[in-house]
Image: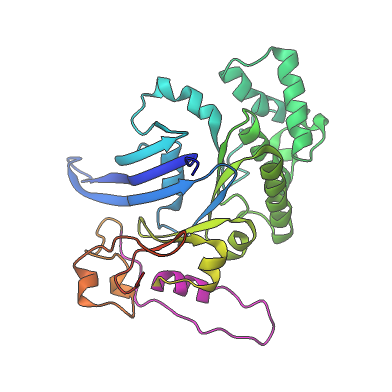
Amino acid sequence: MAEPLLQVRGLEVHFPIRSAMLRRRIGTVRAVDGVDLEVARGETLALVGESGCGKTTTGKSILRLIEPTGGSIRFAGEEIARHPPARLAPFRRRMQIVFQDPYASLNPRMTVGGILAAPFEIHRIGDAKDRAERVAALLRTVGLPPEAARRYPHEFSGGQRQRIGIARALALEPELVIGDEPVSALDVSIQAQIINLMKRLQAELGLAYIMISHNLAVVSHVADRVAVMYLGRVVETAPREALFFDARHPYTQALLSAVPEPVPGRRRARQVPQGDVPSPANPPPGCHFHPRCPLAIARCAQEAPAPRIVAPGHAVACHLVSP
């Protein structure tokens, strides 16, 4: 069996809480609390969950845009979680990100040509003529004319800006691209265009994707596998079809029950978790979901469940699930 392109084991990202007066550490926000993930070459893994569950922090920490507190990140067989910044440079070319907000992710003072040429300048690739040719090729790849290089970001629509963001992510020919809710800020019709563009580029270039999203309709269209996060932990991982038709974790079932039914007149039973999402600064003991879970037993409050394999490629972190 081929080694995964990316292996994440026990990833943790904790942020200190400090007092306003003396700046003493008085607590910890456990934004990511022991995440395990794998991504194969050419595969799309969707990372889903409610806002604030740690999806974006997980994605950024994999790229070392946020420093992990603990755990292992292996990319193409090499451990990079503790590499000093100087040793990360070669990996920066192989791992890229498409940000959520196409309005905030592009420098308004730079032309599109300058934005797309910056990766080549930073990594000292080519001369001015070669970079201009590469920029033109990138624009054509994402469906924009080469003349767009002379314009500024404010002259484009939201969908066009996101195409520019995708072009920038592809500039250095990466193997892994993390999409941080790349279509959530766009109109529905534009979302479809960007999703189809990313799928086409994946097929042409052999890219692996981690797609961070709270939109399960988007996930059902793009993902090969899905990992569900709740309060900093992955509670279920499964192939797309298995997750949508045979979800086993109570939280995943609640998420799926909230998806609008596309057939008029058809209703599905809603499963609404009790209470509010706990604070990551004070997560509950044992299973983080147990205070809101209608099926919780005493063991759930005392012991964090380990993932259990219930079917090939399908793992569930729940004491009530049998293999």
Q: Is residue 66 above or below residue 196?
A: above
> Can I make out residue 65 in this image?
no
The residue shown at (64%, 40%) is 206
Find residue 296 and report its horizontal and vertical position in percent: 28, 77
Front residue (pair 89, 5) = 5
- Using residue 50 as the reference point, say whether residue 117 is left or right of it: right
The residue shown at (23%, 64%) is 286
Find residue 59 and report its horizontal and vertical position in percent: 46, 45
The residue shown at (45%, 47%) is 38
Residue range (magenta): 250-279
> Can I make out residue 244 in this image?
yes
Q: Is residue 105 above or below residue 197?
A: above
- Using residue 290 as the reference point, say whether residue 99 is left or right of it: right
Question: Which image quadrant for residue 127?
Answer: top right
Find residue 118 and report its horizontal and vertical position in percent: 62, 23
The residue shown at (67%, 28%) is 116
Q: Quadrant of the C terminus?
A: bottom left
Q: How many marks?
A: 0
